Amino acid sequence: MKKLCVSAVLFFLTWCTSAPANKTGGPPSPPQLGRGDFPSYEKKVLPNGLTVYALEYHEQPIVAVRLMITAGAERDPANLPGVAAFTADLLNKGTKTRSATQIAETIDQVGGSLEASANMESTNISARALTDSVGTAFELMNDVVMNPAFSAEELAREKQQAESNLVANMQDPSFVADAVFERMIYGNHPYGHLQGGTLGSVPKIQRDDLVKFRDTYYAPNISALAIVGDLPTSESFKLAEQWFGAWSKKEIPPQSESEIPKLDGKRIVVVDKPDSVQTEIRVGHTSVGRKDRDYFNVLVASYVLGGSGSGRLYQSLRVERGLTYGAYASIDPHRVLSDFYSTTDTRTEKTTEALNLVLEQIQKFRSAEVPAEELGNAKSYIIGSFPLSIEIPNDLANRLTTVFLYDLGDDYLKTFRDRLADVSAADVLRVAKERISPDNVGVVLVGKAGEFKAQLDALGKPEIIPIDKLDLDSPTLRK
Amino acid sequence: MRFFAALFVFLLFQAPVSRPKPIEYKETVLPNGLKVITHEDHSTPVTNLQIWFHVGSKDEKAGRTGFAHLFEHLMFKGSAHIKPEEHDKIITNAGGVSNAYTQDDVTVYWETFPANYLEKVLWMEADRMMTLDVSEANFKSERDVVKEERLTRIDNPPYGDLNELLYDNAFEVHPYKHVTIGSMKDLDAATIDDVREFYHTYYVPNNATMVIAGDFKTDQALDWVKKYFENIPKGNKPIVRPTAKEPPQEKERRVVHAKPVPLPAYVAGYHIPADGDPDSYPLVIASSILSEGRSSRIYRSLVYDKQLAVEADATGNFTEHPNLFFATIILSQGKSMDAAEKALNAELARLTTEPVTDKELEKAKNKMRAEYAFARQSVQDKAQALGHAAVIHGDTATVNKEYELFMNVTKEDIMRVAKMYLRPENRTVLIVRAK
């Protein structure tokens, strides 16, 4: 017993003063790695214009199918956010020949899943199944896309659920911060709206709105079908033709481009939630769209500023000061514009300190070139992480439909890493100056306003909105 | 009816029933007690490495709740050859992902990275297993981060503290009574001396299991593991496992809690046996029949037909020691909690009075069959499954053997376990009312 104590004490001592050497010396250098290319696939355009991707994957007896229709919430009627989302949500809630319950029973019975949802720029119907039941998945997917019933009863049910969820979400500080931020930077443009609808719009959505959305936009000529799984390519193409070959082409109306406001100076909105112990913080503005030639430059910039635990925001706010559990910056791209934003949260009394640090880091980022090592690390992260994102069928299907959505070109998945590698420190500094700003920004703080509002005056006059007076449908954000 | 006939015909022409492929692995134990499990998967040039330390929040001593998790954070604060925060940087700069998590029973450190980094990651992991070196200043600033994490996850979100309240009431003596994040008071009380003691007791090779899954050759990987880990000494402090046994619950406990939540909530916790207990398999299948998918019983009744709940769920939390089976409701706007509670309890009671149908049982097993294929695709998923089997079950072979146990569950098994565990006297109910 005594001996054990002595040796333990000695060991502590060693450990405190100079740690025992890892006898093997310095770190081994990783050898060169193959590129980890995207697996080969085939693409075919059916006579009705439907683009079909088939990719074979044989690790497990499974198939992932994703049908993307490139029309989403940005096609919502003016002042009626939520139509695209409800149209998608209702697809698997009943067709001309199957009730919602029958659809659920049928896909659950074979251990599969069939989901439909809309985001800003697309509507996605995804199925997954064991290979032995892929036929069932296709049959149901065809039925819900071709013959949705949009029954009044199901719509009422969805609306009630959506309203309950919204009531809950409108008390969730993180959700509120995101929603207010989007409205601030995009104004009344559909990009700024809640995709699932608001407490104001949901009650107004009618069956006819859904039927019209479906009849106008659900068309093969703006859609892609990706089939990834344990099936021969020929079989995948056969299934695509069998179930979606007879879908009729449509003339799609042009996108109406509504105006997006330019932020001039800082607009600070504080949503007052008096029972908060933490403040949610968002800072940012719009930036380049997905196909802009500067997209990769801004992407690298966002990564350096706050793309990971190595980013400047995380290092400054979490590692150096212990102010937060996380601090990040990112770019969330759309076709025309992106959100470029920083996000963090901190205990109430540190709100101003954390916000100032975020602004300071953005300012610093624009004032000097990113050192070569830091830039190299950022690029090697984005490039090196590619193989991690193409491991499983669902991710592979996702990659393929994203290429289709933004029309990135058939060679994109092969070449984008070379384009990223070309981003220089000068490119990043240029976009930091032209496209990133600490001055013309939207700032959202959701927390206990009384504790920090007085300290904000140095930054600009905050608009303070009590959380129960918040109205996402109003231009002033107030009821 | 017409449809089901059609489906039947369709199935006749189908390929044979798809069976998920088992995970093949090799298990090696070094002389210092480190267990190493390897699985080769060459489909993508990516590897996942996990080190499971068999210590979690249930091993914490009195007055130090939250310590296992706080310690997890400190493992990123530097060792002999790696500066604070450098661990993550090396991984992310290579394009990889690195993180860790702490649960009741285990603390797991993991990285997914381009396959050429395996030797370097092993070197890094050996460095922090052997020579962790945390300064007083870094300890204090990281403790602030953990306190922020508690605010972010527990104290600020509307329903964040439900678990904490439920466990505090459901358990009397077993350390599952406190949740992993711990209390602010205990976090403040922790010292750097606690860090040293904890490290030398639990972070030793004989209390660790390493899993490597991905694009490597097993012989090469094991050579590297030996090179970097063999010289780490076996721990010389006794590891005392918690032995407290929760007394059987004789009577329902009810707690009503008022707080500013947007929608009222109901959570009931029923005491159930540990992960891997023979009764755990029918309980998992019962949970699937109750609440997995839109055709499940609870979804159909509470969410779809009666529209009483936004969410309703029944699922077991299976851990190393006996834990709880949860039945939860988030009420729909303006609905009655009594009605929702009755509807939920009616579904649980139905399992005890009438057998589930053949079709429901087949559906639950098909879901499990799909789960075994879909939830075991990535190298991380596979390493996770192997680590769980090795550490929580103490038998790596269960990673593949449990499949048959699920497939063999009968209707009688389900009724028996429902009667045994899903009884009102065996539950603690927490009702959260809007303030």
Image (spheres, coloured by chain):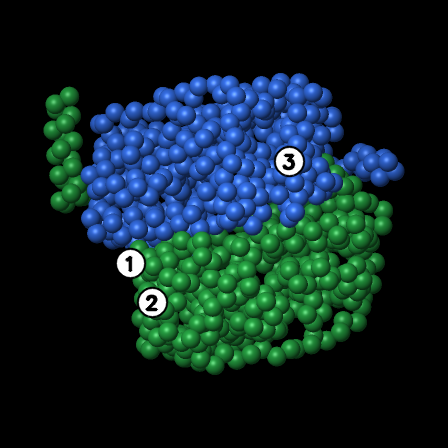
Q: Do discs 3 and 2 share a chain?
A: no
Vertical side of B434 occupied by B428: above or below: above
Q: Amino acid at mark 2?
A: Leu
Q: Nearer the viewer, residue A184 or B94?
A: A184
Chain letter, blue in picture? B
Quadrant in which residue A211 is drawn: bottom right
Graded by Cα atoms within 10 Å as few (under 14), some (14 to 19) or many (20 or more), the crowding at tag 1 reads some
Residue displayed at 52% across by 54% down: A172
Q: Are marks 2 and 1 in contact (CB under 8 Å)?
A: yes
**Which chain's residue wears label 2?**
A
Graded by Cα atoms within 10 Å as few (under 14), some (14 to 19) or many (20 or more), the crowding at tag 3 reads few
Spatial CA distance of label 3 from label 1 is: 48 Å
Spatial CA distance of label 3 from label 2 is: 49 Å
Q: Do discs 2 and 1 share a chain?
A: yes
Which residue in the protein does label 1 denote? A321
Residue displayed at 16% across by 31% down: A8
Question: Circle 2 sits in a helix, a strand or a loop, which is it?
Answer: helix
Which residue in the protein does label 2 denote? A357
Could you say which disc has been placed on residue A184 in the image? none
Horizontal and vertical percent for residue B6? 85, 38
Q: Amino acid at mark 3?
A: Asp
Quadrant in which residue A121 is drawn: bottom right
Vertical side of B311 occupied by A44: above or below: below
Q: Nearer the viewer, residue B14 or B302?
A: B302
Question: Circle 3 sits in a helix, a strand or a loop, which is it?
Answer: helix
Which residue in the protein does label 3 denote? B338
Horizontal and vertical percent for residue B91? 37, 53
Is residue B124 among what the camera can see? no
Vertical side of B419 occupied by A65: above or below: below
